[in-house]
Image: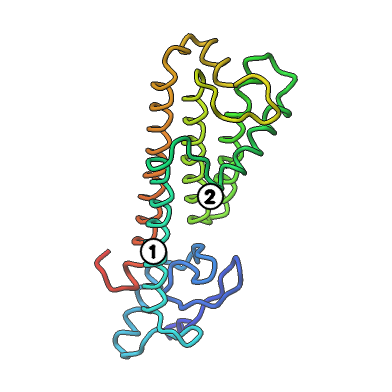
Amino acid sequence: MEAELPENVKCPNCGAGNAADSEFCGACYKNLHIPAEVRAEVKIKKIIAGAAAPAWNGTPAAERHAARLWGRLILIAGLALFYLQWFTHKNYFSPLDFINLAFHEAGHVLLGFFPRFIVMAAGTLSQLFFPAVCLVHLMRRGANLGWQLCLFWIGESLLNISVYAGDALDQALPLVGGGEHDWTYLLTEIGLIAHPRGVERAIFLAGSAVIFWSFYLIGKDALARESLELGNPG
């Protein structure tokens, strides 16, 4: 006798109920680990029976999936507008840079017992290290959108660093507590103090590449997760 397939499967991570033909949890977006052949069989039975997917909170499944997809696209558009601020404002300092600044200053304190070059570089390294730690943590938990946003954060932090590096000669930016300009010292030590604008452009391009890579991953992940539910070819 053929075993009856369940209509709903509980997510092993958050316990939310999901249709047996779902690959990812509709609540936490983590993989449900339902075998592909089981999901396919459930889909086929639904088609044969002419039954629609179970409604969740009164909203048809197709509308839920489409809403999540459009939500990701709107998120990318919003982040892209945020990125464009660096082209419309000189030495732009974003709201996110207040967090970057806190991590930057923490780096100087935490690595303050190292040689001077490392201490001066610690601020820059720290404001990249902390979002990278968040990225790894969320990636290990399977929170795709979370780590993809952390990737964007790393790119944005590089944009902030590029502004600081480009200020090495002018020293027009206000410094927390005064003191020596990190990048004036660093570029002098590595022999690039005569080329702060070139260093600024290189770091800005690196940050832009990371940001656009995060856009690609957010969009690709959204399409990969929603394509089957929306009826698009795999």
Q: Is residue 187 above or below residue 6?
A: above
Q: Secondary structure at mark 1?
A: helix
Q: Nearer the viewer, residue 199 or 154?
A: 199
Asked if residue 3 is positioned above or below residue 156 in the image, the reply reads below
Kindly give the residue lying farthest to the left in the view shown: 233
Residue 187 higher or lower than 132, as above or below? above
Task: State the residue position of label 1.
Answer: 225
Q: Position of residue 16 (x, y in %)?
A: 57, 75
Pointers 1 and 2 in contact (C-beta within 8 Å): no
Indicate the amino acid at tag 2: Met
What residue is rendered at 26% in x and 69% in y? 232
Per the model, the C-alpha gap separating discs 1 and 2 is: 16 Å
Tell me which residue sits at (42%, 59%) in the image. Answer: 75
- Residue drawn at x 63%, y 25% as measured from the top left: 122
In this picture, residue 40 sits left or right of residue 98: left
Percent across and percent down for residue 126 are 62, 32
Near mark 2 (Cα within 10 A), the count class, few <14, some 14-19 or many ≥20, is some
Choose between 120 and 175: the one closer to the eye.
175
Image quarter hosting the C terminus: bottom left
Q: Is residue 176 left or right of residue 62?
A: right
Q: Residue flagged by tag 1: what amino acid is it?
A: Arg
Q: Position of residue 105 (x, y in %)?
A: 67, 32
Asked where in the image residue 136 lies, by quadrant, the reply is top right
Image coords of residue 81 (percent x, y): 39, 52
Q: Label 2 belongs to which residue?
A: 139
